[in-house]
Amino acid sequence: MAGFSGVLKLSDLDDFIAPSQDCVKPVKVEAKTGRGVIQIEDDTLDSLSTPKYEKAKITLNDCLACSGCITSAEVILVNQQSHEEFYRVLAENEHECKRKVVVVSLSPQATLSVAAKFSLSPDECTQKLAGYFKKLGASYVFDTNFARSFSLLEAAKEFLERYKRKDSDPKAFPMLASACPGWICYAEKTHGSYILPYISTVRSPQQVMGALVKDLWASQNGVNPDKIYHVTLMPCFDKKLEASRDDFVSELYSSREVDCVLTPVELEQMLIRDKVDLSQITEVPLDENLSSGTRLLSHPGSGAGGYAHHIFINAAKELFQQDVKELQWKTLRNADFREVTLEANGEVVLRFALAYGFRNIQNLVQKLKRGKSPYHYVEVMACPSGCLNGGAQIRPENTLSTKELISQLETTYSSLPTTDMNSDPRIEMCYSEWLGGADSEKALKMLHTKYKAVEASTSALGIKWP
């Protein structure tokens, strides 16, 4: 298996459509030679024996991001999105003529997974990870908290714009979250142009961070984007697919905004390979400018980033002049499907939901297609329990169940100090000086993206869930 480490062979990936299964995409294999089918001659077979065939192969354009075939995805992507490639770049950096500035961005969900594994506090883990990556050869280590602030602000603004046109645009609502690449991949390949208009155009924090590093930070430091090697630490494998999208490539410099995505399970393998005890690494503070400081911060709301929380509170204030402090979520069919409402003059004026895991996503899409969805906004995540339970998070030891670990991570995440976006002067500076205004063409390019329908030969709606 070229490129990805053996950790990607883990069974029980509690992620995507069908965990640890063979590819769910049916491929018709006819008993004849020709394109896509290779007959293997065997002299021991008589004419009545069943011929053997090579396994059918699919490309990323066929992929439904179910994790079943992630080890057989395109070789180029596999090679680019691996810690072996990261080590190769670090080795090349020993030669001055090929030197690149290595920048690492840490997501809070992935950092908390590593912290739980090594019994570290969030702040200790953040600074030890910074120390470890700098020991390997990274020049700068940031977190993605600042990038998430832009994602949240832009999503709230987009919601208000959709609300203004709700009477003239039948697909203004529900607005569906766009931060989860597993969900986006599923939507593009199974529902095509029908579902895409509902999805927010806002980039995920990873890809906003890519724009910040390869455009803003690069210009501030006089470095061409193609001379920067940007690595992110993310909680799920689909972030590798997201980073590889053609939408996130600088045409001028032919440089991806995120060059390599590492995950907690791969980081664990790296520590073993390097014979490093993370708890013994010297703590190094995160670099300034794009980071939230020496501490690991979060945004109020769910462990998936707090999209529904922020948009709901902002919409309640801007549209109905109500100051909502805390959201009272109501669990519906299961713990991964919850809703919250706002009333004005005795009627419900906002109805938001959290839909995590593909069982709930499937129900959501079916209702949407029948015109039965009552929601204005849905925070959609492919993984049950959201990003803290991403498929690439480190799994619990034998003494702890997955449910107990997730509960522990959720408690830790909710205890993190939160960011006050309204008092961060860097945000206003970025909008005015970097982007040239909140509604500028550059702001649209750097903070938003587009999705496209991809022809697929199967519908995931036909999958029967256990």
Image (cartoon, rainbow, N blue to C red):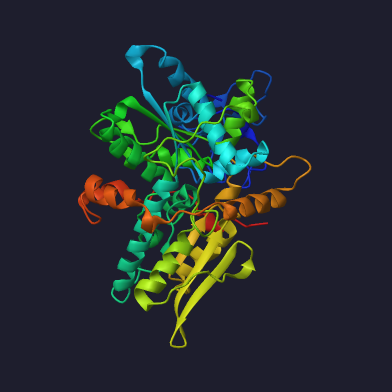
Residue 415 occupies quadrant: bottom right
Q: Is residue 312 above or below residue 125?
A: below
- The foreground one among 27 and 351 is 351
Residue 449 place in picture, x, y as percent: 32, 49
* Pick the front one: 48 or 5: 5
The image shows residue 160 at horizontal and vertical percentages of 33, 68
Q: Position of residue 329 (x, y in %)?
A: 57, 69
Q: Nearer the viewer, residue 203 or 149?
A: 149
In the rendered image, the quadrant that contains the C terminus is bottom right
In this view, which residue lies farthest toward the right? 399
User: Please, is residue 392 above or below residue 447 in the view?
Assistant: above
- The residue under the point 59% across, 27% down is 281
Q: Is residue 61 visible?
A: no
In the image, taking residue 352 as reference, residue 18 lies left or right, namely: right
**Residue drawn at the location 30% of the way across and 27% of the way down:** 226
Return the residue nearer the eye: 373 or 103. 103
Residue 93 position within the rendered picture, expressed as x and y whole percent measured from the top left: 40, 17
Q: Quadrant of the N terminus?
A: top right
Question: Splitting the image into 4 quarters, where does residue 139 fall?
Answer: top left
Residue 436 position (above or below residue 217): below
The residue located at (58%, 65%) in the rendering is 337
Outermost residue, bottom direction?
A: 346
